[in-house]
Amino acid sequence: MSAPAFEKLLREAFPLPAEAAQYLTPTEHQAYAALEKASKPELAFRFERVRLVVAMALIKLLADLGDHEESRRVLAVLHRAAQAGSISEIDKTIHRDAQAFEQLYTNLYVNDEGEQVLQLFERTLDADSREAMDDVLFDALVLLPQLDFSHYDEEEDEA
């Protein structure tokens, strides 16, 4: 899979230039390429950054599927964590806002598509190797064409 799959997931999850600019810095766009080039000492941090950006993309898809406010809060936490300069800073950010993740699953109703996206999100959090992350990327790209965002078209027609 690798960098091209990562980049495609980001384009699909953040299709509007304003959204992409809001959530994705050049560092996030290049996270997978940086992982591929990482030296051994920086490998763990580079992997964590890829994991965060993939998680952001998946949560963005979930938020768009159901216009789910809790998903958008988790997206904001992940975005702040992706700005961190070390694994310990990432952990602090995530732990400081852990309630956002807990609320994501409280009273959450999702359809089949949302459930599949959530499962990919959970697999992203559990991924402990580049191969596992590549599997998530591959499965996300397989799922993307099956996701129905037509409710946005309906909302635009009503406006």
Image (cartoon, rainbow, N blue to C red):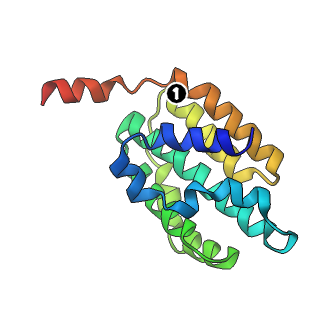
Q: Is residue 20 above or below residue 152?
A: below
Measured as percent of width and height from the top left, residue 92 is found at 60, 77
Q: Residue at x 62, y 31 (%)?
A: 141
Kind of residue indicated by mark 1 = Glu
Q: Is residue 117 left or right of residue 69?
A: right
Q: Is residue 76 left or right of residue 137?
A: left
3 relative to 47, above or below: above
25 or 89, which is in the foreground? 25
Residue lying farthest to the right in this orientation? 40
* Residue bearing mark 1: 113
Vertical side of 34 occupied by 9: above or below = above
Q: Quadrant of residue 149?
A: top left
Q: Nearer the viewer, residue 42 or 52?
A: 42
Percent x, y for residue 104? 48, 51
Task: State the quadrant of the C terminus.
Answer: top left
| Residue under the image location 58 percent in, 72 percent down | 95
On the image, the x and y values in percent for residue 61 come to 47, 39
Left or right: 117 in relation to 122? left
User: Number of labelled discs?
Assistant: 1
Q: Quadrant of residue 15?
A: top left
